[in-house]
Image: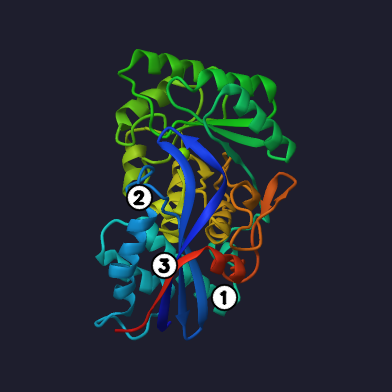
Amino acid sequence: MRIRTVELRRLELELVSPLATANGTHERRPVVLVHVETERGGGDGECDALAEPNYTDECADGAEAVLAEHLIPLLLGDGRPAEFGSAEDAIALLDAVPGNPMAKAALEMALLDAELRSAGQSLAASLGATRPTIPAGATLGMGATSSVIAAARSTVAAGYRRLKLKVAPGRDVVPLAALRSEFPDVILVADANCSYDLSDTGHRAALRAIDALGLAAIEQPLDRRDLAGSARLVAECATPVVLDEAIDSLAALEAALRARACAGVVVKPARLGGIAAAVRVHDACVAAGMHLSIGGMLEAGLARAATIAVGALDGFDLPGDLGASSRYFRPDITAPHELVDGGLRVPASPGLGVALDAAVVEAATARCRVFGPS
Ligand code: MG
């Protein structure tokens, strides 16, 4: 694989509705796109870094800068091989820069898209994923119980059977209990985004009350570093305790497994550094008997396609939170991912299996730069 150019494009997209979480409210959705042009053809990638560095330490502005000033020059600069044996070989060069998993994942996605398109193989097929659809899930932000219930009604009416409610101390048991009683058959998950602390007696009481509601999982209740506390909850709760923010690498997973700090893991390819890393975490979780959930990052259509393909792997047994494009963007930057019988189709065309809508992308573009060999 010979990389000829890399285009770095910054979009400003509008979310259909803001999402309130324990870390703040996501109101805007900047998207960084990369397009690699190789002698075998082109490929596209999308960076999942959010507007603010409040979910992890990456944000869209920072990821764009790291791509422009460090990662893309590694692929195109002096001293690199003239030709890479595969996308994987090219991606390995990026290890010279520590951290920045979401920025790296965008380049990985583009290189894999180019490689798989030229080979005529879909991403899902290349991963060995055989499910034609994955169950869709919808995330509801925090809000007054009446507005949470109203949002849940329209979401369930649209065909979603899996709901995840963002919670935080004081904004948890009442809306969750109301959801549980109004939708007894819906699979329900609570996502705390690290907001509880076992040294607080009120927090402990709330977690006990949440545990009594029969949820499918409680996601990342405690600080990402508090594996001992999480292990205590695993031992005390009937509800599966699932780690999300805490699992940012295979090493972090291994530490959590040693500590018996989780019953399951949310896999977000971008947070782990890309698709290959996500598959390694998936495989390690399956070997350890962990539950698995595929996680969304308010992705636009490209990254949504990639994450759906990863979510089609056999180990995913817990409700994920990937929904249709229309919950997030109207229009999306690709043909929309649509809800069909409560699920999302796994793209089957070569590469990511979706194409950018040039008019939508152009209209949302704030800036665009093309990098060639130095
Ligand atoms: Mg989460």
Q: Secondary structure at mark 3?
A: helix
Whether label 3 touches label 2, CB < 8 Å: no
Q: Mark 2 or mark 1: which comes first in sequence?
A: 1
Query: Which of the 4 quarters of the picture holds residue 70?
Result: bottom left
Q: CA distance from mark 3 to mark 2?
A: 18 Å
Give me the residue at 51% from left, 74% from top: 43
Whether label 3 touches label 1, CB < 8 Å: no
Judging by the rendered image, the residue that carries numbered circle 1 is 117
Q: Callout 3, which amino acid?
A: Leu
- Pointer 2 local density, CA inside 10 Å: few below 14, some 14–19, many at least 20: some
Q: Is residue 347 above or below residue 225?
A: below
Q: Is residue 227 above or below residue 55?
A: above
Judging by the rendered image, the residue that carries numbered circle 2 is 249
Judging by the rendered image, the residue that carries numbered circle 3 is 107
Q: CA distance from mark 3 to mark 1?
A: 15 Å
| Residue 334 visible here | yes
Whole-percent x and y of residue 326?
65, 50
| Residue 265 visible here | no
Indicate the quadrant containing the C terminus: top left, top right, bottom left or bottom right.
bottom left
